[in-house]
Image (tube, grey):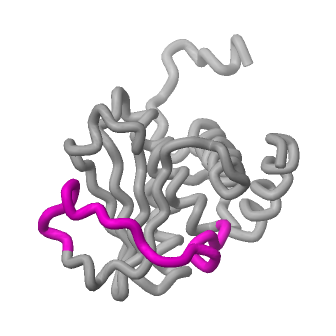
Amino acid sequence: MNYREARKIARRAERGFGLPDDATLRFIHAKLEEQRGRTITVAEVPGLAGTELCGLWLICADRDVVIHAPAKSSWHRQQIILHEFSHMILGHDLNTKGSERFSNLLPDLNEQQVLRTLARSSYADDAELAAEALADQLATRIINSDVGAEPEPLAFRKVFG
């Protein structure tokens, strides 16, 4: 799959997800919890710093857990989380089998509760490419949203578009 095909898949998924024009990360999070009928916990894990793994989705018996490495900025953090949320929107948990062991990173996690995992480290496969394309589209929607936006000094967008 190339990026153009991934964007087509992402556009269909975004339309099917049914976001309003103005959306926030918090809104997407709440909508996913409602659609999936389960809690989604998002947490930063310092142990991921310096590894090639920057995001991880744990599909547990009673909830979903999105774990991310410490991010360089709030935008980077948002992109990692949106990527994992995109896997959920795209239904990638339906295609995964088994679970990797992450007990060294998450010693307090009961591994018996983890049914499957999706770990983000590269964009070498179709699922990763589609999830990143959807994350990009969701990020663009958030950036263009007026919800929670600070008023712009001197009407910057009106002047410069």
Q: Write the start and end of the magenta stretch as one range.
A: 90-109
Is residue 135 found left or right of 29 in the rendered image?
right
Rendered image quadrant of residue 139: top right
In the shown orientation, is residue 4 left or right of residue 85?
Answer: right
Whether residue 107 is in magenta: the answer is yes
Coordinates of residue 24 in the picture (x, y in percent)? 51, 51
Q: Quadrant of residue 40?
A: bottom left
Q: Residue furthest left?
A: 108
Q: Residue at x 58, y 37 (%)?
A: 143
Residue 145 visible here? no
Q: Position of residue 21 (x, y in %)?
A: 68, 53
Count of numbered circles on the image: 0
Q: In the rendered image, is residue 106 in sight?
A: yes
Q: Measuring 30% from the left and 32% from the top, which residue is drawn there?
A: 50
Magenta portion: prevailing SS class: loop
As displayed, is residue 27 above or below residue 74?
A: below
Front in this rendered view, residue 31 or 128:
128
In the displayed structure image, the side of residue 96 where residue 53 appears, left or right: left
Q: Residue at x 19, y 71 (%)?
A: 109
Placement of 32 over or under 122, stated as above or below: below
- x, y percentage for residue 152? 51, 22
Residue 37 percent location from the top left of the image? 47, 86
Q: Residue at x 64, y 42 (%)?
A: 136
Q: Is residue 98 left or right of residue 108?
A: right
Q: Is residue 102 magenta?
A: yes
Location of the C terminus by quadrant is: top right
Q: Is residue 77 above or below residue 37?
A: above
